[in-house]
Amino acid sequence: MTLRIRLSVNGSAREVLIPSSRRLIDFLRDDLGLTGTKEGCGVGVCGACTVLLDGRMISSCLALAAFADGAEVTTVEGLADDERLHPVQQAFIEYGGAQCGICTPGQVVAAKALLDEVPNPTEGEIREWMLGNLCRCTGYYKIIESIQKAAGHARL
Amino acid sequence: MHAFDYTAPESLASALAELEEAGDEGKVIAGGTALMILMMQRLVRPTRLISLRRLPGLGRIEVVDGGVRIGALATHRDVETSPLIRSRIPVLAETLSRVATLRIRNVATIGGCLAHADPNQDPPVTLLALDARVRIAGRQGERQVALDEFFVDYYQTALRPGEVVVAVDVAFPAPGNASAFHKFLPRTADDYATVAVAATVTLTPEGVCREARIGLGALGPTPLRARDAEAIVIGERLSDRLLAAASEAAIRVVDPIADPRGSAEYKRQMAGVFVRRALRGAWDRASREAA
């Protein structure tokens, strides 16, 4: 079955035809070429596929593309304002929040979701929000530090 | 994933009509966090998915005669952050805030959690202790089922073909009542519990237990009530001996399976430990209420 869905992806409106069984992650990566969003575990545990659906972070591997009908999707590609990186992206670079990079798009999107809702989070709040984003390189301290610095920057 | 038809009806009546028409081939989907995995693993292969996501008002959390009605489409996060739930039934907000990760709680619905009937989930444990009632809609109308009659077996419920969960009703706690939820997570904070226990007790002003209910999770083919343990504490005051007797009675009703979260024998022992902790936690809170 083919579905016609209307949605906004990173601010641009789109109307597309998709097979009804298309997952959101496959739609983003394979149909739209937005390969920043990664598939790690494929069962909603690792966080690499984190995107925002109407501002709420979700696992795009556990969502049908059909769920985005009428909604706004934000992926890592939608965070920067042209060449100007989002404060979270800038902080991840400056404070070493990324190493191999596979988990980074999901980390960055989750951190943006956090700062959108809690602009000045405590370390406990950062840990709660980032709990589901696994990183096998940095050991998390630098990720937490990057988010703290980004929050500071966002306040300036 | 396999091919299927997908519709998102805009009224409950059309959703129920479509579900009836689809028969065995149909499945309802809401948040999808459980069903998507089952489909990707090819454990279920419905050829028709009927999405409840467009049904208006089915996610409302509202006060109805002496309690709260949580619409089936309310997400775990909606319930966890609801000022009404936080102030009137705090143990439910507390339980939901500890399910999986925020990313899952943003999506997974209460109705989906109940209909999925995975005995390892946390919310049914607390909802059992709170004596919740499930509201079910079918083509013949709505009916209510007590939650402890709703779960039948692993992933099986009292839902009949063509029926969907539309809400869960939870009464506000009586004066002198308090609850606690304790789960054992030896691996990671977002894991399924090795064991989970919720207890609710209502105390007289003198500190005697008038009413008690205990819910157990990850300890059998369904979430369980520890009824013998409840009977042991009713009419009594808190003591170490009472808690030991209650936990021994609770251990007798559990039937856990061995998995990477622990051997069956270990889970039985932990069930005893966590029944003690949950009862003591609820009792301490209820004493403060009564004071």
Image (spheres, coloured by chain):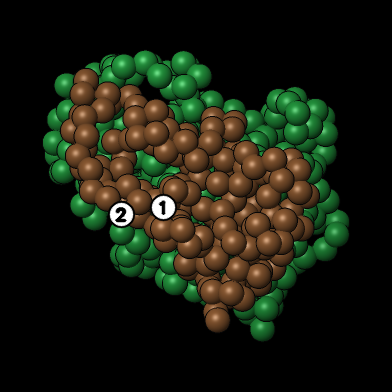
Q: Which mark is residue A11?
A: 2
Q: Total number of numbered labels? A: 2
Q: Residue furthest front?
A: A83
The local secondary structure at tag 1 comes to helix
Q: Is residue B54 left or right of residue A83?
A: left
Q: Nearer the viewer, residue B179 or B252?
A: B179
Q: Name the residue located 51 percent from the left edge and 60 percent from the top edge.
A: A85
Find numbered disc 2 in the image and state the secondary structure of the residue it sits on: loop
Using the numbered discs, state the Cα–Cα distance from disc 2 to disc 1 in whole angstroms.
8 Å
In the image, residue B200 sits, relative to residue B260, either above or below, namely: below
Q: Is residue A140 above or below residue B248?
A: below
Residue at 69% from the left image edge and 75% from the top image edge = B287
Subunit of label 1: A
Quadrant into which the C terminus of chain B falls: bottom right
Q: Which chain is brown?
A: A
Q: What is the chain identity of the residue bearing mark 2?
A: A
Residue located beneath label 1 in the image:
A78
Q: What is the three-letter code of the residue carrying label 2?
A: Gly
Going by the numbered disc 1, the residue's amino acid type is Gly
**Near-viewer residue (B65 or A155):** A155
- Letter of the chain shown green in the rendering: B
* Residue for point 73% across, 26% down: B259
Disc assigned to residue B152: none
Image position, residue B208 (x, y; %) = 69, 69
Q: Quadrant of the N terminus of chain B?
A: top left
Q: Is residue B216 visible?
A: no
Is the C-beta separation of discs 2 and 1 under 8 Å?
yes
Q: Of residues B46 and A150, which is closer to you in this image?
A: A150
Where is residue A90 shown, x and y percent of the image?
59, 61
Q: Residue at x 35, y 35 (%)?
A: A32
